[in-house]
Amino acid sequence: MYLYNLTLKPSTAISFAISGNFINTNTEQILLANNKLLQLIQLDDTANGSKFQTLISVDVFGTIRSLSKLSLHGNDKDYIVLSSDSGCISVLEYDSKKNVFHVLFNETFGKSGCRRMIPGQFLAVDPKGRAVMIGACEKQKFVYVFDRRNGKELKINSPLEAHKSHTFVYDIKGVDVGWENPIFAAIELDYSEADVGNGAQKFLTFYELDLSLNHVSRKWSEPIDNGTNMLVTVPGGVDGPGGVLVCAENYVIFKNTGHLDIRAVIPRRSDLPAEHGVLIVSATTYRKKYFLLFLLQSEYGDLFMCTLVYGKENVTELKIKYFDTLPVTSAMCILKANFLFAASEFGNHGLYEIRAIGYAADVESSSATLIEMEEGFQPVFFQPRRLQNLARIDQVESLMPVMDMKVANLFKEETPQIFVLCGRGPRSSLRILRPGLAVSERAVSQLPGIPSGVWTLKKNRKDKFDAYIVVSFANATLLLSIGETVEEISDSGFLDTVPSLCVSLLGEDSLAQIHPNGIRHIREDRRINEWNSKRTIEKVASNGYQVVIALAGGELVYFEMDMTGLLIEVERHGMLGNVACLDIAPVPEGRQRSCFLAVGSHDNTIRIFSLDPDDCMKILSVQSVSSPPESLLLLDVHASVGGEDGVYLPAGVFLNVGLQSGVLYRTVVDMVTGQLSDTRSRLLGLRAPKLFCALVRGRRALLCLSSKPWLGYIHGGNFLLTPLSYETLEFAASFSSGQCAEGVVAVTGDALRIFTIEQLGETFNETMIPLRYTPRKLVHHPNGKQLIVIESEQGAFSAEERKAARKDCLKAVGMEVNGNHNAQKVENSNDDEEICGSLSDEQYGYPKAESQNWVSCIRVIEPRTETTTCLLELQDNEAAFSVCTVNFNNKEYGMLLAVGTVKGLKFWPKRSHAAGFIHIYRFIDDGKGLQLLHKTQVEGTPLALCQFQGHLLAGIGPVLRLYDLGKRKLLRKCENKLFPHTIVSVHTCRDRIYVGDIQESFHFCKYRRDENQIYNFADDSLPRWLTASYRIDFDTMAGADKFGNIYFTRIPQHISDRIEEDPTGGKIKWEEGKLNGAPNKVEEIVQFHVGDTITCLEKTSLILGGHDCIVYGTVMGCIGALQALTFREDIEFFSRLEMNMRQEHPPLCGRDHLAYRSAYFPVKNVIDGDLCEQFSTLSPVVQKKIADVLDRRTPQEILKKLEDVRNKII
């Protein structure tokens, strides 16, 4: 078995976000990174406001541990510095012309992998760009000095050591000291005396780099609070006082060498329990010409504005003021255009406009008013409110973390939907993913009849926007003007009493209307020339300068504009039968005419005719197709050597053919000879595709209207054919106006629709259904269309308790709030609505409760209507962790729902619980509601439930137990207690049971009905911390572990046959175990390191008529697939391509690709499709070199192979 791994939706989590001038000093970009993806985005102003545009996204095939920018004095752009698990420090430069990251340096300093004593976890850059300190979690730190060779070329010197034994590092930042020797500040925990009972102490240490001596020394070290977790650099020189802000638990302290500590308390929520401290988790600096402030965010999501009052030498006061409340972020950065980008820990990331900087009265703590008490410093309380200083204007969708996933066609569409549970707490959601691009509908208008065509026209070819929309009916033509309002025009010169076959702009400023009886040419001065036909015109093609019509009987008539702007007849050609469809290629830039005409006939052939004056209407090539053609479109692709759509794109003309069988053919037309080559096909639907032209990023794109709309366009160097999540359309045309620069106008039924296509390059579009708590598991009703979700949250209050707290909040307005240390008035409580009604749980989060408090609910969702039909809150501190549908042999109740819960679960100091339960519910109201039958107490936590032969299988701790349905509780039938740790998954097939252990991978069991016993006959010899599992076939299981590996295990065929052929079961019962386990061991047939913890696996087909593949979701929000390669030729081809890509295109961060994919176990029988797909980004020279090695004539054949295998998956 060989598999092809392909990422369908890249990871949407963000670990690092920094703003900088990576192109030039005039533009500002945001550099994003998660564990393995490096992405550069830019804010663009559109008609609908500021939106993000992705410039480049690159998989580094490694784990990015830290990221920063390097700003050199006098340089026109910033460099990128990152550390990864490659053991290298990497310096990158973005080339905007070629749209690539160039590697300037990959300096090796240690072993590969994320190790605690190998630097890379922390990265600090000197504000002047002279040096970089890279530190490990423990002991080791290196300093790299940068300078310029010949005043231009960047140079990196050998590293200088700054090690300190017996220390843990919590954070490192560069201190702004102007042009003096660079200084780096570090939070270090010294545990050298911890063994002798003195305890460990944290220190703030300043390291100085002496540029003259080329040496690093410890300049200053001072004990600090052990709750310190973070440093923030304070600008120095003319921009500020220098030094650092030390963020500790409940406090922020300003520190600098030779300066007294300036301390201020962090304001805390009035409902926060006393034992809960306040920590700062992310920060950013907001620096303008006349002021300096810092935005600090606490672990609860509250933003604080921190300001310093300072003179020429000293800081006199530190102020911390409540600013706003946002979802908790992993990183924040402020753009010069007054925008704040907040990369959320969970859920969607937000872009906010800064509308004020906190001058309004609000809760504020200050070092000048700090009051010291016996128990510490007096706290300052506040009540969160709705946004006042910020306003969200855009968001980046994120699936992090994917908790569970199911693939089913509940909407009865051509392709199944992916239902994903994601998020955490009040930001949790159920996302419905459909393959395709999202569509934003702008306008819908009813028409007086059923249209037969639609076109858009400009007044002049040089105009930017369209001026008219032309709609054709069975016996009329309607012309609409485009402006502030859409109005009908009656004096346009068009014949409005006949249907139109084609309407187009001719030349620079004249119009042409082709109807069944002739051609009407409308000049700019309203002169009209007509050409009438004795026979009916059936088909038309035009490119703005040339017109070809097909008459009844199969005669072709070719027209061309002359130098005076008249449309003259040039040539006639007789066909053997009626013409099915035809199209003219666009006129190449700098040419007078196009040389190619494509004609489709009912005899299943496509002919390419020459329109050159020397051999006009000569047949250049003929292509046979599998069914009669319905529509043709000749699409030109302009040559490109960079830019947002890819790196290297050769010029060419592609012939697209929509067949009556629903298949789209795409073939290349030779620009000189007209010969056809490189034919590709894809089934689009059950209807014959109609092909139209659309505009995408200023380029012509393919719009196919079949059972659903499809868009074909160039993105990232590849041609992507992606469905649109929209209803079936009949006719369409490109549309451009001041409010909609690149849109589509289309007709369906009697409606005229205008829409835009969004999020180009995405594989899926999302529909979100909000949830209440963190989702755990998802099942769908096998006989209905409902989804059942179980949710549970630790350390939160129930819905009734939160509702009561909101009522109590009314009484606290303007009154004393009972604090834990002292009473303090809530200063920013303006009105009742602000306190109790306006701040959503998604923004504010849930009030914090004791860690042993759990809240949980069971939700029934109707996904088609996006409504919750039933919501049951669990009581008595129970939390649900497993769910399944089960049909017992007792047919009284039919399909039932089993839910496994645990009461009083604790994780610290030792994992414990009060009791476990299995709830049995019956479905009511056609599956829309639930009714509790009974619940059964068990001794452990039921983490796995599964139906098995009319019974319920439950994994309760290390026990696998079989239950039957009783009147008042479940009845035990049999059990097996021989599993090593905790059962987390159970799958069944016939009489086999596949058990997943949390630490010991899979165990294969067999149930003997005659003995009522469960026997364990095979297991895995390798320990695996299981996070996801799925049964592939009778002998094969797919699993994933918490270290980011996916693997397949299979029972050898002879063992499987022996187990099944044993009539008495004696061999299983008395066979001796091996390696302290089962008597037989499974074989590992697939192993691959994904680089992200996989949380769910599904086996399905995502395309119409496609083969099954394994779809997986990860904790970082990635959706990927594994497709089986069935032919030996494909296996050899992709294996050799992958090997050559490793040599010719190594990863950016210096990580060895083979070592990365074999991080924990050697990669086995898996091709890395993500690496292979980077072939399109290589230069033509490298592409040709690889193609020669693979015995392929051209790189286009390799690209075709890559496109074919991708089309088999999505």
Image (spheres, rainbow, N blue to C red):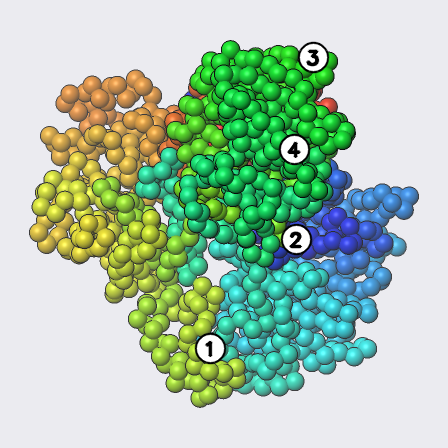
Q: Nearer the viewer, mark 3 or mark 1?
A: 3
In the image, taking residue 786 as reference, residue 720 lies left or right, namely right
For disc 1, the marked residue is: 834
- Residue 838: x and y, percent? 45, 73
Query: Which amino acid type is marked by label 2?
Result: Asp
Q: Quadrant of residue 1039?
A: top left
For disc 4, the marked residue is: 529
Which numbered disc flags the more N-terminal residue, 4 or 1?
4
Instruction: Kindly check if marks 4 and 1 are in contact, taking CB atoms under 8 A apart as contact.
Output: no
In the image, taking residue 567 as reference, residue 849 lies left or right, namely left
- Residue 404: x and y, percent? 38, 46
Q: Secondary structure at mark 3?
A: helix
- Residue 350: x and y, percent? 55, 58
Query: Which amino acid type is marked by label 3?
Result: Asp
- Report the front residue among 955 and 334: 334
For disc 2, the marked residue is: 44
Q: CA distance from mark 4 to mark 1?
A: 70 Å
Query: Which amino acid type is marked by label 4?
Result: Asn
- Which of the numbered marks, if any, corresponds to residue 136? none
Q: Residues within 10 Å of mark 1 (few under 14, many from 20)?
A: some
Which numbered disc flags the more N-terminal residue, 4 or 2?
2
